[in-house]
Amino acid sequence: MFKNISGIAATLWLLAAQASYGQSEPQHQHHSYQSSGEDNEEEPMAEVSLDYVELRGDNGGEIEGDFSYGGEQNKFVAEVDYERSSGEIEKNELWALYSRAISANWNFLIGIRHDFNLETTSRNWAAVGITGESPYKFEMDAVFFYGEHGSTAFRLEGEYEIKLAQDWNLVPRIELNFFGQNDEARGSGSGLSEAEVGFRLMYEVTRKFSPYIGVHYEREVGNAADFAREEGEDVDSTVWVLGFRAWF
């Protein structure tokens, strides 16, 4: 889908930086579809959020972001999640979601996810879950997937922003992927299949634009690790990352 991730990242960096200087600076939210949950009659608004646009030291990178349109209570969201590791595409997803506020800090999500795959067949999932922020400001996404031929999956993502100084933040991040069955062709195993942990040190140029540097670790687990070993692949990796976060 993306043949030159470094070129895409550089282009997005310039666009995000330009947009961030030309707009006001309200408080940033990691996911644009999070809501205050308050009922109001405000006009629908459009927003673009680039949560992670980064290059990685293993000839890889990540682009995760979304476009949302709606009000505080109801939003429609289109999300892209692309990840490349050691020159190979690990994740290439397009989401279409409806988001509904169910409390002051939590939203209900329902929609579809399409996985693009160049080596095996692409596939579709029905998605249902929640996204929001705990009382301790821990942001979390929990989504259950039901796919073709009865396949199931579950993804749990979380991050926490630690303020080190006025403009400096340390952001730990974790992602866990579970599957209901083995799929050797795609390298996924039943149960916990993959775990990712990262730390990113961000500098707030403005509240809408934060470049960062960090470290990212990921590991195949259980049957997924066995499949990787059979193919002569590493089951874990640690890489440095360089990127930015922006929204406008």
Image (spheres, rainbow, N blue to C red):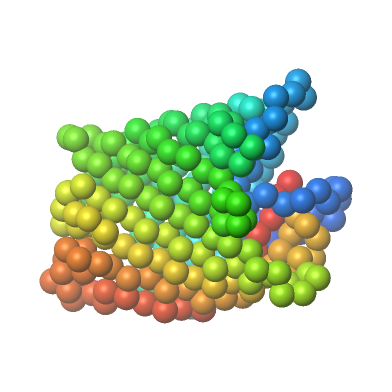
Above or below: residue 224 compared with residue 213: above
Instruction: Name which quarter of the figure residue 191 lies in.
Output: bottom left
x then y, percent, for residue 82: 46, 54
Instruction: Name which quarter of the figure residue 212 lies in.
Output: bottom right
Let me know if residue 185 appears in the view.
no
Residue at point 64% right, 27% down?
73
x then y, percent, for residue 222: 20, 66
Residue at point 35% right, 65% down?
195
Above or below: residue 41 compared with residue 98: above
- Between residues 237 and 61, which one lies in front from this camera angle? 237
Q: Classify residue 233 as left or right of residue 160.
A: left
Above or below: residue 29 compared with residue 225: above
x then y, percent, for residue 56: 50, 73
Q: Give the farthest residue toward the left.
A: 230
Instruction: Name which quarter of the figure residue 75 lies in.
Output: top right
x then y, percent, for residue 190: 19, 54
Q: Classify residue 210 as left or right of residue 26.
A: left
Q: Give the farthest residue toward the front.
A: 135
Q: Give the farthest residue toward the top.
A: 41
Residue at point 50% right, 61% down?
62
- Between residues 90 and 106, which one lies in front from this camera angle? 106
Q: Classify residue 18 as left or right of residue 91.
A: right
Residue at point 70% right, 30% down?
38
Let me know if residue 137 appears in the view.
yes
